[in-house]
Amino acid sequence: MAGKRVSDEQLQELIEAAIFVAEKPVSKQMLKETVLSDIAASSERITSAIKALEIHYQTRGIRLVEVGSGYRFQACPSLVLGLQNFGKSVHLNFPELHLKH
């Protein structure tokens, strides 16, 4: 596969950052066509990197989850009540839960 070689850690970082800054869920295809377009990464390696990120975030305040159109970060379900008082409007994306004061 042609393209720049990156370590598994660098691949995870690129995927993590792309999903974090995206306004909408990010599909594997979108990753391949954008942030990973010049990177040597097979579909299997991309899937493995995403799985590693999902595992990493299982014990954090946010989760990396797969939705119908791709992957996104969302607040941990157990934190929903604590986040209700954060700002005027909190979009928790759990699932599409929007809390307003």
Image (cartoon, rainbow, N blue to C red):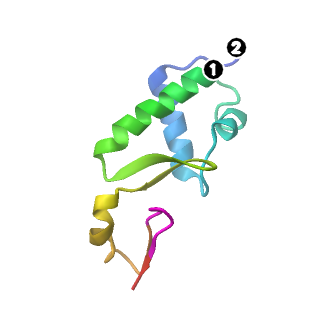
* Of the two numbered discs 2 and 1 in the rendering, the one whose residue sits closer to the viewer: 1
User: Where residue 45 appears, x then y in whole percent?
Assistant: 55, 22
Residue pushed farthest bottom?
Answer: 101
Placement of 70 over or under 10, stated as above or below: below
Stretch of the chain drawn in magenta: 92-98
User: Where residue 100 appears, x then y in whole percent?
Assistant: 43, 82
Q: Which residue is mark 1?
A: 42
Mark 2–mark 1 distance (CA, rounded to whole Å): 8 Å
- Verify whether residue 95 appears in magenta: yes
Placement of 17 over or under 50, stated as above or below: below
Instruction: Say if mark 2 contacts mark 1, CB within 8 Å.
Output: yes
- Main SS of residues in magenta: loop
Mark 2: amino acid? Met
Circle 1 crowding by C-alpha within 10 Å: few under 14, some 14–19, many from 20: few
Q: Quadrant of the C terminus?
A: bottom left
From the viewer's perspective, tell me whether residue 42 is left or right of residue 52.
Answer: right
Placement of 85 over or under 62, stated as above or below: below
